[in-house]
Structure formats: C-alpha cells, structure tokens
C-alpha cells in the first residue's frame, strides 16, 4: 500500500471490489439467461457462477501481485534516493 498517497490506496480497493463484482454478477446473469433459454433448471447458473468466482479470484491475485511489485519498486527507489542523499 502506498503510505504517501491515500487516494492510490482507495483506487486500489475500488479496483479490487469492481474486479470481483463484475465477473461474478456477469456470469450469474449469463447463467440465468442460458438456463431460461435452454430450460436446464439451474445447471448453467451454477456453472457460470463458479466460473465468475474463479475469474474474480484470478483478478484479485493479478491485482495483488501487480500492487506488490509496484510497492517493491517504489521502496527500492526510495532506498536508492536515501543512499544517494547520504553521500
């Protein structure tokens, strides 16, 4: 997390929430539509909802690793600037 900019933290949390909600809700409604179209009970609803949850977990992992890399890069830059200023 970015300690210098709280808006960046808010943006990251918002991005996580949206990237979890959209695939789950989208797959839910697609599954509901397919069930009504083909008359399969709740088969497609269940399958598509599971796929949406898996996609949301994948999105969460990707965003988390990307944020971690950016945080490491920022801390390395801060450490590099501190060592140069001490010379």
Image (tube, rainbow, N blue to C red):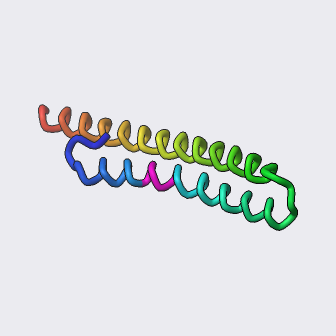
Q: Nearer the viewer, residue 36 or 77?
A: 36
Identify the residue at image location x=30%, y=37%.
Answer: 75
Q: Nearer the viewer, residue 54 or 36?
A: 36
State the predominant SS element of the stretch in magenta: helix
User: Which span is picked out in magenta?
Assistant: 15-19
Would residue 42 be found to the left or right of residue 15 on screen? Answer: right
Residue 14 point in image, percent of width and height:
38, 53
Residue 81 point in image, percent of width and height:
21, 40
Would residue 86 be found to the left or right of residue 44 on screen? Answer: left
Would residue 29 be found to the left or right of residue 62 on screen? Answer: right
Asked if 77 appears above or below 38 in the picture, the reply is: above
Residue 39 point in image, percent of width and height:
86, 61
Identify the residue at image location x=71%, y=62%.
Answer: 30
Q: Quadrant of the N terminus?
A: top left
Would residue 40 be found to the left or right of residue 6 on screen? Answer: right
Identify the residue at image location x=43%, y=40%.
Answer: 69
Please, which residue is most extreme toward the bottom here?
A: 37
Q: Nearer the viewer, residue 16 or 45?
A: 45
Identify the residue at image location x=31%, y=42%.
Answer: 74
Q: Is residue 39 magenta?
A: no
Quarter assignment of residue 37: bottom right
Asked if 2 appears above or below 41 in the picture, the reply is: above
Residue 83 point in image, percent of width and height:
20, 32
């Amino acid at each position: 997390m970015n300690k210098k900019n709280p808006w960046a933290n808010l943006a990251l949390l918002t991005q996580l929430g949206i990237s979890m909600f959209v695939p789950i809700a989208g797959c839910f409604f697609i599954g509901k539509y397919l069930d009504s179209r083909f008359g399969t009970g709740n088969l497609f609803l269940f399958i598509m909802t599971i796929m949406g949850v898996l996609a949301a977990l994948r999105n969460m992992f990707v965003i988390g690793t990307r944020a971690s890399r950016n945080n490491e890069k920022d801390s390395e830059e801060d450490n590099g600037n501190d060592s140069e200023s001490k010379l």
